[in-house]
Image: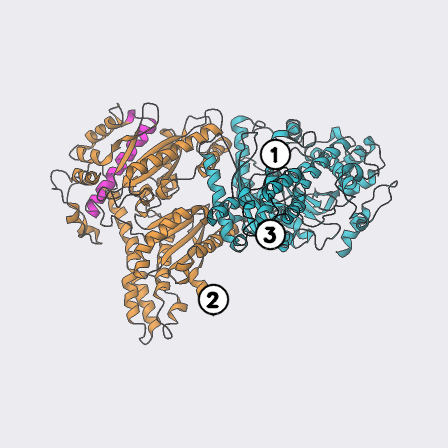
Chain colours: A orange, B cyan
Amino acid sequence: MPLRGLAKAKNFTLGPTAPMKTFTENIHIQTKDSNNLRNSGKSHKLTNNIQNENLFRYESKIKSDFDEIVPTLKEIARIQHHEDFINKAQKISRKNLGIDLPLHVLDKSWVKPLDMRALYAWCAFKQHDKLSDNFFNNDPLEGAAGSRDAEDFEKFLLDCGIHLLDITPCSDGRLAHSVAYVMRIPFSSVRRRSHAGALFDIENTVNRWVKTEHKRYRENVPNEAHKDTRYLKVVTYHFSSVDPLHQGCAAHGSNDKLAAAEGRNKLYAFKEAVENSFCCGASVDLMLIGLDTDTDSLKIHLSTSDGGIDLEKTISTLEIYNSTINFSKEDAEREICQTISKQSSKDKLSGLEKFTYKLIVNNISQIDYVKSFHNGSYEDIGHAERFIGVGIGFKEVHLRNLTYFAHLDTVEEGAPDLDVGVKIFTGLNVSQDLPIPVVIRFDYSGKVPGAKERAINDCERVNNAISIRYKNLVDQGLLHTCSTIRDRDNIHSAQIIGMSLDKKTEEAH
Amino acid sequence: MPLRGLAKAKNFTLGPTAPMKTFTENIHIQTKDSNNLRNSGKSHKLTNNIQNENLFRYESKIKSDFDEIVPTLKEIARIQHHEDFINKAQKISRKNLGIDLPLHVLDKSWVKPLDMRALYAWCAFKQHDKLSDNFFNNDPLEGAAGSRDAEDFEKFLLDCGIHLLDITPCSDGRLAHSVAYVMRIPFSSVRRRSHAGALFDIENTVNRWVKTEHKRYRENVPNEAHKDTRYLKVVTYHFSSVDPLHQGCAAHGSNDKLAAAEGRNKLYAFKEAVENSFCCGASVDLMLIGLDTDTDSLKIHLSTSDGGIDLEKTISTLEIYNSTINFSKEDAEREICQTISKQSSKDKLSGLEKFTYKLIVNNISQIDYVKSFHNGSYEDIGHAERFIGVGIGFKEVHLRNLTYFAHLDTVEEGAPDLDVGVKIFTGLNVSQDLPIPVVIRFDYSGKVPGAKERAINDCERVNNAISIRYKNLVDQGLLHTCSTIRDRDNIHSAQIIGMSLDKKTEEAH
């Protein structure tokens, strides 16, 4: 096992013209300027370089919005006893972060040291708010995985025999970009439900399956119920090729064999639940994928002869990338077809093979993305999330290591996922005396009367449960929450309905 | 308002041949022997007297099983320092209660006073277990509202244009017999979801609606999706005719106008949620019913001219009972028809009117039941529940004032319901130094692999949440839990998977 990650890393070449760099050589040369950074090695013929540039521009912009918080607050900390402090602080904040700081926090600097924890949390929440607004209003992933590509992609899915694509990646922030970046799938064409260890909830997913089938029967959406298509459930577990024993999935003790096996168990249980609970040949399709969080390459598990999922045999997109790096576009396409099927042309592929082909080609762009902008392997091979997202929603978050997701209805049920997140952020933030920013989100259907009020109540209930479960952190100002709701029937962005920062101010009076 | 209840009570006559007794006269003459008790006043011609006898025999047997606990434990308490105590205690318990007491509790009587709280909880759990076994194995409500009548009743429902009957009574134990006794509906033909104030969960009920419709589309069960039938959602709020200002619904401050209005709001919200979320004329039928917890008579709310629910205009089954007490069967039937419709024959009724007719006739038997066996108004006009039922299930509980229901998936969401129950039992039990017996239940589908394990996990999660939320009571042995699961695909009874009594023993070692 210890050698496996290294072996994998060695396999990752940049092609004959670009001699391979070791990961340690690369790790510290990343800067924020994509033009300077871009590796000069040639890219794969199937790579969409323009899309890559756009995606990197987006990633850089958003992440720098968050990463400017600490330097900005340090600058502000230094002047807290200067004359006209509030105006000076706001000026710095507007210039560096594009946001105003909360007056009721700044206001107290004369009487007690500035509450930097509160300011940090405020800035993280405001940057998330900006990102969210921008996402829903400007569709920044357009042309890559944006909502405007969704219609074509949904037609493609139906061609592949899939009427719903439901993906569960791990909650881990290093998988938060799985859909839009790693797989290059329009975010709105996918049901994404993140869970620690990718261990999704069976009953909840069966409910979703029922809703999906009901819509087909009642509305012929996305297609008629009698059409021979399936609900595809994908589990994306993860591993680290650079440091397999420490940077794999925490929920499975960095054991990728276990992560794959447990993912398969969940998929089988879901399929059996559907088959045993409903008549008339009800079933679903399953797919198990491993994601290398260092290179963003995929291992797509093959089927066994009896229709199950093979834990050993996989298609490695990194191997395909390396073996076809010198190929023409046509040759590379043919090679991929032959890897997944006996067909020699992509036009002859059908069903899940056709979908797999798409995933591989899309992921080749991402392998080049990591190669071009992150020197072949991310600098942050471990956790580096900026906030925890709790609740139902977060359609706007598609960046690696930005958000740890705890997808939950209640803290009581979702505590295992949330505990992992808090543990991660204890290392990332609390150890540096910075608070854990927790964004709570409940999406609702604006078409349903009372649904908005219920979403607000859900936020309050979860906020309250968090403040009980993590009382120690909350009492010290080391965990702050920002409650948000979003009307999923409306393109407009999420709405902040309250922050723990507000409450503390009220209590202080 | 203060006079309303009294006015109602005055209206409740036993007919000209049986001069009306006041409630206070009646209140203390109840005994457990039905033959001695049965009021000699004549019954209504539409009353099913044989069914009434059977139902009363069942109610008496089960309640006496619980009500013998305290006298039995008092007897045992007196001999705790006698020679051969354990054998003597077991003998008394077997004779009076038909159960063995837990050895590990009895065993300690020589070293510390007998833990009567633990014994009380144990006895309550064991009596519930017996009731549950008996219910699922012997169908004790057969011929009244048992499972064997279900098939006929479901056909009748379809005749009325109803393909699912979903009733939400209040969690209050005084409504726990609503289905099997008050409405005389086969328990297995109904989806019952009890909530404090009858305030059911909209999203959860929409999910249930989707599942119901999906089954019609996929399996033609209970009928084809294109058939013009509806999902009927009934809310049963309650009030007290004897003491309207104190013994009404606690969740609505004993204000029955508010209880009715809030129930209607929920019904409207559910209907709008279905209509706005689904196309093609998706809708549901609604019914609002008030239940007088003293007489078990119903007020069935009429429709307004625009198809809504009228908060003022109701059909009172008690008024019908009184006005037709001297009628022949045929005349009474005709009178009921004319009260609810312009039709003069029950055979000409259709749709919800046909269903309403059935409810009224069934409820007349229950009015006579209360008249015959409880002297026209229950002795226990207030709370007198024997245990709290928490979770999903309890198909076996159909007796008045036996169980306070907190229908919930999580304590986090269901806390308002559960808090009311704990408050009620603080008055009933804790004030007498007796513990609150809480039976946790999660039903599961045995056909689905892993569902049993998940139900066990759900029990443990809820048990844990209860022990945190009510720590003070639990620490003093004033709240005990018994976790049970039941395979809903199997006729066999529920299964106890653990009690807080077991745990306390382990901890003591």
Q: Nearer the viewer, residue B28 or A404?
A: B28
Q: Is residue B337 visible?
A: yes
Residue occupying the far bottom of the picture: A83
Name the disc covering residue B230, or none: 1
Residue A26 in percent (x, y) is at: 16, 48
Residue that carries the numbered disc 2 in the rendered image: A507
Q: Is residue A335 left or right of residue A285?
A: left
Residue A90 in percent (x, y) is at: 34, 67
Magenta stretch holds residue B252: no
As displayed, is residue A483 above or below residue B122?
below
Q: Nearer the viewer, residue B27 or B267?
A: B27
Q: Is residue B335 left or right of residue B186?
A: right
Name the disc covering residue A150, or none: none
Residue A208 in percent (x, y) is at: 46, 37
Secondary structure, magenta segment, majority class: helix
- Amino acid type indicated by mark 2: Glu
Name the disc covering residue B420, or none: 3
- Amino acid type indicated by mark 3: Val
Labels 1 and 2 in the same subunit: no
Give the extent of the magenta segment. A347-376
Quadrant that contains the N terminus of chain A: top left
Q: Nearer the viewer, mark 1 or mark 2?
A: 2
Residue occupying the far front of the picture: B83
Labels 3 and 2 in the same subunit: no
Whole-angstrom CA distance, mark 3 to mark 2, is: 28 Å
Whole-angstrom CA distance, mark 3 to mark 1, is: 33 Å
